[in-house]
Amino acid sequence: MYHEVALDAAPRTIVASYGGARLNSPDDLAIRSDGTISFTDPSYQAPETRPQQASRVYRVLPNRTVEVLDATLSEPNGVALSLDERTLWVGSATGLFRFPLATDGSVSGSRTQVAAITGAVDGLGRDCAGDLSVAGGDRMVVLDRNERLIGAITAPGATNVAFGGADRRTLYVTGLGNPPTLWSARLEVPGLPD
């Protein structure tokens, strides 16, 4: 069932630029319980002359201060927080990376690549058990909270994941294969509404 939502106010801009130049093409975001927003800014839809010279992962504090979390990942894309908000995962053109976070949400150590994932990563989703659904390449995989592979489905050109259904136990996966496709799979654990 679909319905229209009436917006009683115009949307407000939170951040549109960094260092005096517009962002390249903000893609994905994760929001901490304190309102801090982490988001990725790859160059996929950026103008030919890129406004930002690096693809970055940013953090926007509740007071709207913008900080760079990483400026070295190749085309950062999907982003997700662990249930305890102590880990930030970021998918990129070269894999999935883990950033340890301090209690205030700042990066507290070196990023590491998640060994269970090879190749480009697009969308990320989480479930109530802390498992991470990862879309990229020609499949969607599920990693447990210790980043061990616990399941996978073939999904040519997998781009994004989201949970739905009345009990949030249906995982949907989009793909840009030939032809572009939308898949679904029933899971035992409900997903989070990212």
Image: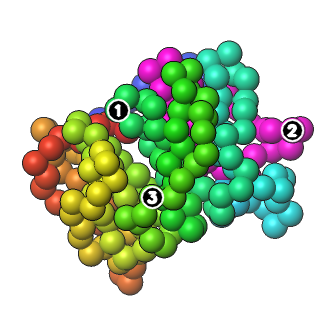
Q: Which amino acid is tagged 2?
A: Gly
Q: CA distance from mark 2 to mark 1?
A: 32 Å
Region of the chain picked out in magenta, as a range: 14-41
Q: Which amino acid is tagged 1?
A: Leu
Looking at the image, tell me whether mark 1 or mark 3 is earlier in sequence order. Answer: 1
Q: How far across and down, in percent of the image, does residue 177 sit?
A: 39, 79
Q: Is residue 130 above or below residue 143?
A: above
Q: Residue at x 22, y 39 (%)?
A: 129
Q: Which residue is mark 2?
A: 19
Query: In the rendered image, which quarter contains the C terminus?
Result: top left
Judged left or right of residue 7, residue 104 is right
Which of the labelled discs sits on residue 83, or is there none?
1
Q: Residue at x 56, y 61 (%)?
A: 92
Instruction: Using a 10 Å C-alpha cutoff, classify the residue at mark 2 as few (fewer than 14 neighbours), some (14 to 19) or many (20 or more).
Output: few
Q: Residue at x 24, y 67 (%)?
A: 152
Confirm whether the magenta stretch covers residue 26. yes
Q: Is residue 138 above or below residue 152?
A: below
Confirm whether the magenta stretch covers residue 25. yes
Which of the labelled discs sits on residue 114, or is there none?
3
Q: Quadrant of residue 33?
A: top left
User: Contact, CB < 8 Å: mark 1 with mark 3?
Assistant: no
Q: How far across and down, in percent of the image, does residue 144 sit?
A: 27, 50
Which label sits in the foreground, 3 or 2? 3
Q: Is residue 118 above or below residue 2?
A: below
Judged left or right of residue 183, residue 27 is right
Callout 3: helix, strand or loop? Answer: loop
Q: Is residue 72 above or below residue 191?
A: below
Q: CA distance from mark 1 to mark 3?
A: 17 Å
Q: How far across and down, in percent of the image, does residue 107 sit?
A: 61, 35
The answer to whether any part of residue 147 appears in the image is: yes
Q: Which amino acid is tagged 3?
A: Val
